[in-house]
Image (tube, rainbow, N blue to C red):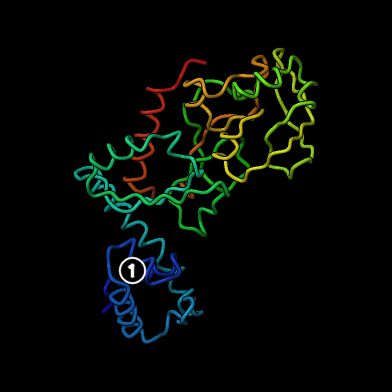
């Protein structure tokens, strides 16, 4: 007779691609996961997984079995999660992808408060200015600034208001002066992601709502938002809200705005969103709504 718990565990292993990751998400040692999948294979009389020192892969029988049982397992998990959410508290691991300077924007105290309120939740941050592959890197939720290019993820705009134009450091403005027109940006040192000396196009909305373009360049290049913020000659701010509030950065050409500026939260899928992830995002939205500066 098949053990349904072993079937559900096999589905998790197939999705995660490793005994270790499936065990980490389920709170089981990898050797226990491996042993129980072996028990399932013995009960079925068929090998479901090809094992190697580097990775696991489904056999043809394993793929067929996964396709037949995954939806049923998901239905059972949905029912259990709904019941647990109604009477219990969020629990489990949340993997969060965000920019390297995320905690300059979202204070660590907010995260600490959340963990204090939900003692069964654990959070693991993957901080990098490179865009994470949510599926391949097993990310539960990601925060991204600016326009979104990914169409395969579920996204939600976050309530971040305030300056969405250009900013510069007070020292730079004292030394070089502020540009009076969009065309004057070409004569200034702008911080871009391009190689030093190369020109890139910045698109901005003029006060009348029309889209205008400026070709800009500079002598500084940084591969993290933190480095760009600290250099701050002329910078399009993604997460410069706190610097503006503290006066470390000042607005430039305030009548011009960047299209698509802001912050979004992304999920790999709307289905089976864990209660812990929902609670974490709800906390972030609540904090941002209560701390967003006036536009």
- Name the residue rendered at 50%, 26% in the picture: 243
Mark 1 Cα within 10 Å, few/some/many (few <14, many 20+)? Answer: many
Q: Is residue 46 above or below residue 149?
A: below
Q: Is residue 172 above or below residue 141?
A: above
Q: Is residue 79 left or right of residue 206?
A: left
Instruction: Give the residue at the far front of this rendering.
Output: 175
Q: Is residue 207 left or right of residue 277?
A: right
**Residue 155 % position (x, y):** 51, 39
- Name the residue rendered at 73%, 28% in the picture: 203
Q: Is residue 191 above or below residue 129?
A: above
**Residue 191 % position (x, y):** 67, 35
Count every numbered label the image shows and give the total: 1
Name the one closer to the observer, 269 or 146: 146
Name the one closer to the observer, 182 or 212: 182
**Residue 24 % position (x, y):** 33, 63
Q: Is residue 112 above or below residue 73?
A: above
Give the SS element for disc 1.
helix
Q: Is residue 42 left or right of residue 216?
A: left
Query: Which residue in the protein does label 1 denote?
Result: 9
Name the one closer to the observer, 115 or 172: 172
Instruction: Give the residue at the far left of this rendering.
Output: 87
- Name the residue rendered at 38%, 34% in the picture: 107
- Name the residue rendered at 74%, 14% in the picture: 180
**Residue 139 % position (x, y):** 45, 53
Quadrant where the N terminus is found in the figure: bottom left
């Amino acid at each position: 007779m098949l053990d349904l718990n072993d079937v559900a565990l096999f589905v998790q292993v197939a999705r995660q691609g490793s005994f270790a990751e499936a065990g980490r998400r389920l709170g089981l040692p990898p050797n226990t996961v491996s042993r129980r999948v072996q028990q399932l294979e013995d009960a079925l009389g068929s090998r479901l997984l090809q094992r190697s020192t580097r990775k696991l892969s489904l056999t043809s029988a394993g793929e067929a079995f996964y396709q037949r049982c995954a939806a049923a397992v998901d239905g059972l998990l949905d029912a259990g999660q709904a019941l647990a959410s109604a009477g219990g508290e969020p629990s489990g691991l949340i993997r969060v992808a965000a920019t390297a300077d995320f905690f300059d924007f979202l204070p660590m105290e907010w995260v600490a408060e959340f963990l204090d309120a939900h003692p069964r939740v654990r959070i693991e941050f993957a901080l990098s200015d490179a865009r994470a592959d949510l599926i391949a890197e097993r990310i539960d939720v990601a925060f991204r600034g600016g326009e979104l290019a990914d169409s395969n993820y579920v996204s939600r705009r976050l309530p971040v208001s305030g300056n969405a134009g250009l900013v510069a450091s007070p020292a730079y403005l004292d030394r070089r002066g502020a540009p009076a027109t969009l065309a004057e940006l070409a004569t200034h040192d702008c911080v871009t992601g391009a190689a030093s000396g190369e020109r890139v196009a910045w698109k901005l909305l003029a006060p009348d709502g029309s889209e205008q373009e400026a070709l800009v360049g500079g002598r500084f290049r940084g591969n993290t938002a933190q480095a760009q913020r600290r250099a701050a000659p002329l910078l399009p701010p993604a997460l410069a809200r706190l610097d503006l509030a503290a006066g470390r950065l000042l607005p430039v050409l305030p009548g011009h705005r960047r299209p698509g500026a802001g912050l979004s939260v992304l999920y790999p899928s709307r289905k089976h969103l864990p209660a812990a992830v929902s609670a974490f995002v709800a906390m972030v939205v609540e904090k941002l709504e209560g701390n967003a500066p006036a536009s």
